[in-house]
């Protein structure tokens, strides 16, 4: 499968191999949901009945968020019950909620541990001959003004069930 370009965790990886980070599905869902609530296109796709006729900026900045009426902020933060949310996420093709196995089932894919992101990213940069001392940017952080969703045991269980096949790729 091509010439080896480097070693990660004692394994040699040919140039034609792909790399993807595995992240705990519950943690990943909460992170994606927290970030994606700042995008009205996502809110309207998941909850059309709640935001019909409501003008929301794209994306919702902190200033715009606090300028919204309280009832709209409440809809953003607590749109529906968790069962409805999980069903709607499963039905809609939104990249942040796609199962990780969609990437990991690809030919020659190597699964890296997101929980060690900085270390794994630096090793990966080294495999491809890059400067491992560079600052590694982290994208898609949840805006600090959006409250975290309330995660009940049932909600956590529902997320785990929805992504149950992703756990077989856990590299830990």
Image (spheres, rainbow, N blue to C red):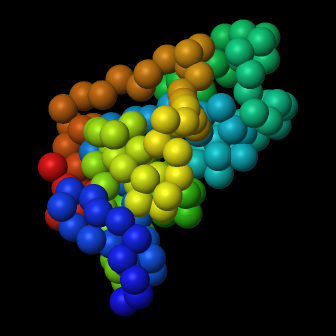
Q: Quadrant location of the N terminus? A: bottom left
Q: Is 34 placed above or below 49 here?
A: above
Q: Is 30 placed above or below 48 here?
A: above
Q: Residue at x 72, y 39 (%)?
A: 40
Q: Is residue 130 left or right of residue 103?
A: right
Nearer-the-camera pick, 115 or 87? 115
Q: Which residue is drawn at 27% across and 71% down?
A: 12
> Is residue 128 among what the camera can see?
yes
Q: Which residue is drawn at 41% across and 60% down?
A: 127
> Is residue 83 among what the camera can see?
no
Quarter-of-image position of residue 107: bottom left
Indicate the position of residue 9 as horizontal and vertical percent values.
20, 57
Quarter-of-image position of residue 7: bottom left
Nearer-the-camera pick, 152 or 27? 27
Indicate the position of residue 141 as horizontal and vertical percent values.
54, 30
Q: Is 53 placed above or below 68 here?
A: below
Nearer-the-camera pick, 47 or 90? 90
Q: How many labels does the image show?
A: 0
Indicate the position of residue 114 as horizontal and vertical percent values.
33, 44
Q: In this view, does 70 lie to the left or right of 130?
A: right
Q: Residue at x 80, y 31 (%)?
A: 56
Quarter-of-image position of residue 60: top right
Indicate the position of residue 91 as horizontal and vertical percent values.
49, 63
The extreme bottom residue here reads 1
Q: In this view, does 115 lie to the left or right of 9?
A: right
């Amino acid at each position: 499968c091509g010439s080896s370009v480097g070693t990660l965790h004692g394994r040699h990886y040919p140039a034609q191999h792909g790399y993807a980070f595995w992240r705990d599905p519950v943690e990943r869902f909460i992170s994606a949901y927290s970030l994606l609530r700042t995008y009205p296109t996502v809110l309207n796709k998941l909850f059309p009945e709640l935001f019909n006729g409501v003008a929301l900026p794209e994306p919702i900045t902190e200033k715009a968020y606090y300028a919204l009426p309280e009832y709209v902020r409440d809809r953003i933060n607590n749109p529906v019950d968790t069962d409805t949310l999980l069903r709607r996420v499963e039905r809609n093709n939104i990249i942040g909620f796609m199962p990780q196995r969609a990437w990991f089932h690809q030919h020659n894919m190597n699964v890296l541990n997101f929980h060690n992101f900085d270390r794994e990213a630096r090793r990966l940069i080294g495999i491809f001959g890059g400067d491992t001392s560079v600052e590694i940017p982290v994208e898609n952080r949840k805006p600090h003004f959006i409250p975290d969703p309330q995660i009940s045991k049932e909600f956590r269980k529902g997320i785990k069930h929805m992504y149950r096949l992703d756990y077989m790729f856990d590299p830990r």
